[in-house]
Image (cartoon, grey):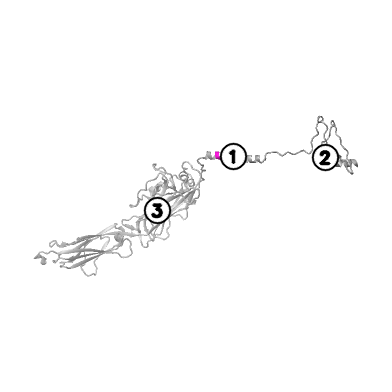
């Protein structure tokens, strides 16, 4: 059926001015829809066409294509104006009028409901394409583009936290350096400190479910040592496979956590040390299953380049004693790390916290050899959680959760004595100073006549020989022989040739006896 119109009898020149408007949630990245959002989400496309010419425009309409698995066209709108029509799944059509009269404006509004349950399989972006068409018989003059595209980003807002600790939080090493590895011995031969590395992951956003996620534990396997060699020296020796403890909240889902078998085969007790069962913490969870688990697509595949020298800093406020500290991390070139990748499966709020526990030993011999001049060594472990999904994860300024925790290791070895550089000179000066001081002391004592002997007179002297003549009487004998008023003592006369029995004079009491 052919309808008559005025443009059949004259040439018409309509002038169309199209405008595209969108009503959709926006954030810093632009239009967005959120996976698992409890609130109703919708997208509205409003297309307005104004005929600014003096002639009518025939067969003017807008065609909109959209992803049918994510959006549902709402055809029950009660707004006044043209109503959209579903042409086929994924395509809608709305007519502006036939004809669109001169100097008239018409708006088509297409509303789409977001299928939240289907967004879990959505890509990172999807588009809505709108195109305005008109009769080719009477082509209009166009004042603006007749097509437009709305790009919408698919996101999931999550609140996943990671916490970790190493028990005990401080370790000490001492003793002497040993050679070789003692195979088939107890785990205490590795080192004196037994470690328990604990990692905890939890989804704190209510009514949310992350379909699939993975945990990456950067394990400090070896030190950098000689960077040109393939292997370094052991640092943290993993004794057993990680095991998962019970969650705080009961859940009906029986999800098995799987960790990468390639990493665990390399790390877990490669030299067969005997693990002490009595030291295992209680209660004990279930060991993780093992299989090939790859890194998440957006996770770094390599660590930074190794450095040949330690980055040592002097510790402040140590007085006259100089002490040094260093930090070892997988991301500062000081460690050879092995990533332990674990597939957590669905991570929901109802599942509660997922805890990993890994028993290990500090390899003391490495600390004695390479860190004997370092007082404190901080070893850092980094744990990263990433969602394995096609859409974008929104966690504020990042798309993943990460946390680092460390173990402080103190040097308890006795420091070797440090001798001065000019030790022989100091010894010579000390000896010279001692001799000089001794000489001065001797001179002072000599000047004070400390070394002269005292001379004592004998009270009684021996008689002289006969050749020397008669002995002169002593003053004491003269006093005894002098006559007194009541007693006259006899005078003893000694001759030169007479032999004396005693050198001493008889006591006074003897004279008294004789007189009586």
**Residue found at the far left of this picture:** 9
Q: Main secondary structure of the magenta part?
A: helix
Q: In the image, what residue occupies the spot 22% across and 70% down?
A: 80
Percent x, y of residue 472: 82, 35
Q: Secondary structure at mark 3?
A: strand
Label 2 to label 1: alpha-carbon separation: 55 Å
In the rendered image, which quarter contains the N terminus?
Answer: bottom left
| Quadrant in the rendering for residue 38 | bottom left
The residue to which callout 1 is attached is 436
Label 2 to label 3: alpha-carbon separation: 115 Å
Task: Give the label on residue 348, or none.
Answer: none
Q: Is residue 91 magenta?
A: no
Residue 105 or residue 135, whichever sits in front: 105
Disc 2 + disc 3, Cβ < 8 Å? no
The residue to which callout 2 is attached is 476
Q: Nearer the observer, disc 2 or disc 1?
A: 2
Q: Which residues are magenta?
A: 428-439
Task: Give the label on residue 383, or none.
Answer: 3
Mark 2 neighbour density, 10 Å: few (under 14) some (14–19) many (20 or more): few
């Amino acid at each position: 059926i052919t309808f008559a119109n005025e443009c059949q009898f004259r040439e018409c020149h309509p002038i169309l001015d199209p405008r595209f408007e969108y009503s959709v949630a926006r954030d810093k990245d632009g239009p967005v829809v959120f996976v698992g959002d409890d609130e109703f989400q919708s997208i509205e496309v409003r297309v307005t066409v104004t005929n600014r010419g003096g002639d009518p425009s025939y067969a003017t309409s807008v065609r909109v294509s959209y992803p049918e698995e994510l959006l549902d066209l709402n055809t029950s709108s009660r707004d006044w104006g043209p109503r959209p029509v579903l042409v086929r799944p994924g395509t809608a059509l709305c007519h502006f009028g036939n004809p669109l009269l001169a100097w008239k404006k018409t708006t088509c509004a297409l509303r789409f409901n977001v299928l939240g349950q289907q967004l879990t399989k959505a890509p990172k972006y999807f588009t809505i394409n709108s195109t305005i068409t008109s009769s080719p018989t009477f082509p209009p003059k166009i004042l603006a583009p007749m097509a437009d595209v709305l790009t919408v980003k698919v996101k999931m807002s999550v609140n996943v936290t990671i916490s970790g600790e190493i028990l005990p939080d401080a370790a000490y090493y001492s003793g002497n350096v040993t050679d070789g590895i003692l195979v088939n011995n107890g785990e205490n031969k590795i080192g004196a400190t037994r470690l328990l590395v604990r990692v905890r992951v939890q989804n704190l956003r209510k009514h949310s479910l992350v379909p699939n996620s993975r945990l990456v534990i950067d394990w400090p396997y070896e030190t950098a040592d000689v960077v040109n060699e393939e292997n370094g020296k052991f640092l943290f020796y993993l004794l057993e496979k990680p095991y998962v403890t019970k969650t705080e909240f009961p859940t009906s889902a029986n999800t098995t956590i799987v960790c990468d078998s390639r990493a665990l085969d390399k790390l877990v007790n490669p030299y067969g040390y005997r693990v002490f069962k009595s030291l295992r913490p209680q209660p004990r969870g279930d060991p993780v299953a093992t299989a090939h688990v790859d890194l998440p697509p957006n996770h770094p595949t390599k660590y930074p380049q190794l450095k040949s020298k330690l980055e040592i800093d002097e510790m402040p406020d140590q007085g006259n004693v100089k002490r040094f500290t260093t930090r070892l991390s997988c991301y500062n070139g000081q460690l050879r790390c092995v990533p332990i990748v674990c597939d957590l499966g669905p991570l929901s709020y109802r599942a509660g916290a997922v805890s990993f526990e890994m028993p290990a030993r500090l390899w003391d011999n490495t600390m004695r050899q390479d860190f004997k001049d370092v007082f404190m060594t901080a070893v850092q472990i980094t744990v990263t959680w990433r969602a394995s999904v096609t859409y974008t994860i929104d966690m504020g300024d990042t798309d993943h959760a990460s946390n680092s925790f460390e173990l402080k290791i103190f040097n308890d070895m006795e420091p070797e004595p440090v001798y001065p550089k000019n030790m022989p000179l100091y010894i010579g000066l000390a000896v010279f100073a001692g001799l000089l001081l001794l000489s001065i002391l001797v001179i002072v004592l000599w000047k004070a006549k400390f070394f002269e002997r005292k001379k004592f007179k004998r009270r009684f002297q021996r008689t002289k020989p006969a050749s020397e003549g008669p002995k002169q009487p002593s003053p004491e004998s003269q006093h005894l022989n002098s006559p007194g008023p009541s007693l006259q003592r006899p005078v003893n006369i000694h001759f030169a040739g007479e032999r004396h029995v005693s050198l001493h004079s008889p006591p006074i009491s003897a004279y008294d006896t004789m007189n009586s």
